[in-house]
Image (tube, rainbow, N blue to C red):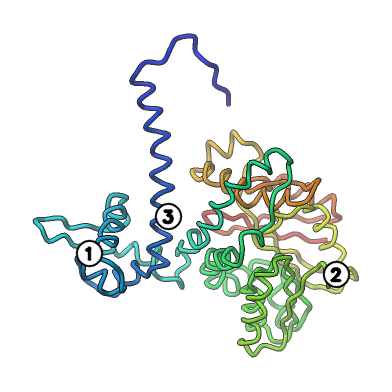
Amino acid sequence: MSVSRSATPPTDDQIGLFAYQVASQMSGAVTAAMIHLGDRLGLYRALDAAARPVTAGELAEATGLVERWVREWAYNQAAAGLVVADAAGDDERFSLAPEAVPVLVDEGHEMCLLGMFHSLPQTMSKVTVLPESFRTGVGHDYDSHGPEAAVGIERTFEPWMNAHLVPDLLPLLDGVVERLTAGIAVADIGCGSGSAVLHMARAFPASRFAGYDISRHALGRAAERLAGSGLANAAFHDPRDEPLPADGSLGLVTAFDCLHDMTDPAGMMRAIRASLADDGTWLLVDIKAHPTFAENAERNPMAAMMYGNSVLTCMASALSEPEGAGLGTLGLSADRAEAMASEAGFTRFRRLEVDHPVNAFYEIRP
């Protein structure tokens, strides 16, 4: 994909159209901030609870906020098409369309997107330090975003995981549910706040589950959730203090949306291979990507967002140490994952038939 500069000066219309394209990006950024506020201030929940169109004053009263601020927020949301506005006459009223409730209110629904906006302020604040990363090549890890980053990741990935991990995803792995039922040792790499570990531990009490993560904030949340769960077959570790076993003792390893964030993903693959029994299974879940930028730009409607998010978070994490791999958000295509797995000592690689808007799923075996 290449664009050559024309010798013909652009027309005023062409300049105007390009200026509109640039300005429209700010519209998305500002509206994203308003979605964060709508979640944080309970405005979406209040609109849903009202069960009828309400005025800005009624919405402000329900949330304990000031009407003028609520009204301007509602205008933004209505103009963006996220909130329904009935502006007939002087009695303006606002409501949520039925299809908006699963996305903006119901955190138990697999399509809830609130987690994407939870840590938006912390993520966007990185633009103040990123110039130095561009100069030095060294990024920043997820803990540099503070504890809200761990919460945001948790809220982003848990809805789908809670709905599908145990009943739908694990049964796709050859013989794994039977082995989990009988009892095996399992490790979840990049466990975050522990949702997958706790879900699996609850479903398969005969097996033992260990979650590994380098985020102190995420591990703190995982420990709190474990303490409240009553489960005795789960634990969480920082691999810098308690490394993954290297004795082939594990029957299953899982890694959800974390390999592309790692400074040394190849080293992690080798460690996973050393931890797995010869008849073990590695479930790798990572961002769906194509081998080249041209393919990603053409086939992925969210490519611009993902490349930008990579600079702010994913690639920044993967380059948080000197000589980091720096794969980035769209850096682990199926071809690259298979090649890296082969180099790490795996011999079988199978893409699972899972319908997911963002992720690809792979069964990898020794």
Nearest to N terminus: mark 3 or mark 1: 3
Residue type at numbered disc 1: Ala
**Whole-Å distance between the Cαs marked 2 and 1?**
60 Å
Label tally: 3
Which quadrant holds the N terminus?
A: top right
Residue at the image position 59 percent from the left and 33 percent from the top: 294
Residue type at numbered disc 2: Ala
Give the answer, above or below, for where 348 lies relative to 135.
below
Query: Would you say the residues marked 2 and 1 are in contact, meaning their CB atoms lie under 8 Å apart?
Result: no
Q: Badge 2, how many Cα within 10 Å: few under 14, some, many 20+?
A: some
Helix, strand or loop at label 1? It is helix
- Which label was assigned to residue 33? 3
Nearest to N terminus: mark 3 or mark 2: 3
- Which label was assigned to residue 56? 1
Where residue 92 sits: x, y (%)? 16, 59
- Which label was assigned to residue 277? 2
Q: Nearer the viewer, mark 2 or mark 1?
A: 1
Give the answer, above or below, for where 304 lies relative to 59.
above
